[in-house]
Image (cartoon, grey):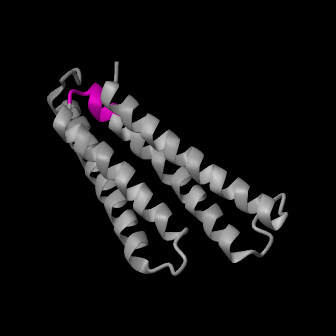
Amino acid sequence: MLPVTALYAGLSGIWLVLLSLAVIRLRWRHRVSLGDGGVAELERACRAHGNAVETVPIVLIMLALAESLGTPAPLLHLFGLGLVVGRVLHGAYFFVDRPGLGLRQAGMGLTFLVMGALAIGLIAHSLAVLLTGGNGAA
């Protein structure tokens, strides 16, 4: 069981649904059935959704691996919350009337921090197990 990962997968899933609905709403409004139709607002919405789809799955996979290896729950929650907040900040950038780089940079920075920390932790754990001949159990 991976209850912490399940929580953040669910929250991320809700965010992805909201981003998808924003794209659909804009496609209806601008009568665009595929792509962004050259509409800047729709292009931003598509990128907000696309960027989330490109980053959320790998972070959730790494979070699940970390949880399965026995990473303490408070640390897992820190990573999961960082992912969700980072994605919401990043996505919000694309929907404000006058987008500033602050939200986007903060969102990507937080997402990359979580992604990088999980990656380094997983690599370190794997190398420790491989070098000591352990079985990988926490």
Instruction: Write down the region rendered in magenta.
Output: 64-70
Q: Is residue 100 left or right of residue 106?
A: right
Query: Percent x, y for residue 76?
Result: 24, 38
* Residue at x-position 36% and y-position 40%: 62
* Residue at x-position 66% and y-position 72%: 41
Identify which residue, 111 or 31, lies in the foreground: 31
Does the stretch in magenta take in 104? no
Total number of numbered labels? 0
* Residue at x-position 16% and y-position 32%: 72
Q: Is residue 58 left or right of residue 110?
A: right
Q: Is residue 9 above or below residue 18?
A: above
Query: Percent x, y for residue 136?
Result: 23, 24
Q: Is residue 91 above or below residue 133?
A: below
Residue 138 in view: yes
Q: Is residue 53 left or right of residue 6?
A: right
Dominant SS of magenta comes to helix
Q: Quadrant of the N terminus?
A: top left
Q: Residue 97 appears in which quarter of the rendering?
A: bottom right
Does the stretch in magenta take in 69? yes
Q: Quadrant of the C terminus?
A: top left
Query: Percent x, y for residue 120?
Result: 26, 49
Residue 57 in view: no
Identify which residue, 69 or 82, lies in the foreground: 82
Query: Percent x, y for residue 18?
Result: 57, 49
* Residue at x-position 28% and y-position 34%: 66
Q: Is residue 12 above or below residue 38?
A: above
Q: Residue 11 appears in which quarter of the rendering?
A: top left
